[in-house]
């Protein structure tokens, strides 16, 4: 495999990077680092031995470790790419193996109180919370792509305890793989992503389940679905373990977002009950104009 080398005297950004969790995001970050020559050696670990072997076979990582602590030992960067429900446990497991200058980052889509708990587990200042906004409904090493982060956004949520040099390294890492980086308060992050990410997934799962329960004259309705339902429920194909953990970790903000969604749905129901065509048109037109701006 030919490795592309970045300029700047050919020096890699990190000597040894450990990727704990070699699925879509962890595998893609490894692939992007390899393509751009940002790392000398990539070592991976995954709780799924088949996934780990696949990551080695695909060339996403150079070496496979026996556990999370083993891959973190000797690494100058450890990336925690596991479901948010496992982050604290993995952080506790790797902490004793980390060198004094090692940096730890994650890719979780929930921050808030979780950031404080991880900071308490890891060496002071060496944890840099990150959230690359580049998910897909597919998962596993085979779904990984070196181009996944190009033109996307990555949000960093440092705290007053975050080491400034470590923060600069992680910012540069994400910029080098093609992301636009910004910083945000961890709590603000969770309110925003409860609305724009976690709520749509919750609604997609609920709508798909509602379709399973609907009957028309005793006939299942799903076989008659077309592009609209498929487009709307695409994210319901996402990993349920990952999204269960996200929903629970961001429960207060997601509950607020769900209440807002129920209020919007109630307006449609009220207009329909009243036969109020003008109100229905206004709801549809408002949504249409916003959706066109997102395209």
Image: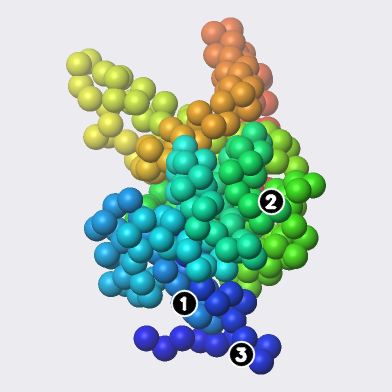
**In this rendering, position of residue 290 left or right of residue 219:** right
Mark 1 vs mark 2, foreground winner is 2
Q: Nearer the viewer, residue 23 or 95?
A: 95
Q: Residue at x 20, y 16 (%)?
A: 218
For the question of whether residue 209 can be seen, the reply is yes
Give me the C-alpha separation between circle 2 and circle 3: 31 Å
Please tell me which of labels 1 and 2 falls first in the chain.
1
Q: Which residue is mark 1?
A: 41
Q: Secondary structure at mark 2?
A: loop
Q: Residue at x 27, y 65 (%)?
A: 53
* Residue 277 vertical position relative to residue 285 in the rendered view, above or below: above
Question: What label sits on residue 10 in the rendered view?
Answer: 3
Q: Which residue is mark 2?
A: 124
Q: Badge 2 local density, few (<14 within 10 Å), some, or many (20+)?
A: few
**In this rendering, position of residue 70 left or right of residue 54:** right
Displayed quadrant of residue 115: top right
* Place of residue 157 in the rendered image (x, y in percent of width and height, measured from the top left): 70, 48
Q: Residue at x 64, y 65 (%)?
A: 101
């Amino acid at each position: 495999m030919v490795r592309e080398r970045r300029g700047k005297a050919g020096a890699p950004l990190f000597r040894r990077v450990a990727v704990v969790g070699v699925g879509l995001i962890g595998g893609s970050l490894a692939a992007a680092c390899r393509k751009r020559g940002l790392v000398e050696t990539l070592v991976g670990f995954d709780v799924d031995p088949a996934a780990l072997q696949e990551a080695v076979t695909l060339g996403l990582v150079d070496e496979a470790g026996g556990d999370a602590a083993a891959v973190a030992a000797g690494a100058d960067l450890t990336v925690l790419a596991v479901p948010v429900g496992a982050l604290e446990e993995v952080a506790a497991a790797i902490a004793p193996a980390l060198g004094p200058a090692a940096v730890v980052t994650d890719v979780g889509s929930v921050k808030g109180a979780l950031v404080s708990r991880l900071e308490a587990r890891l060496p002071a200042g060496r944890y840099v919370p990150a959230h690359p906004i580049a998910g897909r409904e597919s998962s596993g090493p085979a779904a990984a792509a070196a181009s996944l982060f190009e033109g996307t956004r990555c949000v960093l949520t440092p705290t007053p305890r975050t080491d400034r040099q470590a923060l600069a390294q992680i910012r540069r890492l994400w910029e080098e793989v093609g992301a636009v980086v910004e910083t945000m308060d961890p709590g603000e992050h969770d309110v925003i992503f409860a609305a724009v990410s976690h709520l749509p997934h919750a609604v997609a799962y609920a709508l798909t389940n509602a379709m399973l329960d609907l009957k028309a004259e005793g006939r299942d309705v799903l076989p008659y679905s077309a592009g609209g339902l498929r487009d709307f429920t695409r994210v319901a194909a996402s990993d349920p373990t990952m999204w269960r953990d996200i929903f629970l970790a961001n429960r207060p903000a997601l509950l607020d977002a769900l209440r807002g969604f129920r209020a919007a749905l109630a307006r449609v129901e009220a207009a329909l009950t009243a036969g109020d065509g003008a109100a229905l048109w206004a709801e549809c037109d408002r949504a249409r104009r916003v959706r066109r701006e997102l395209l």
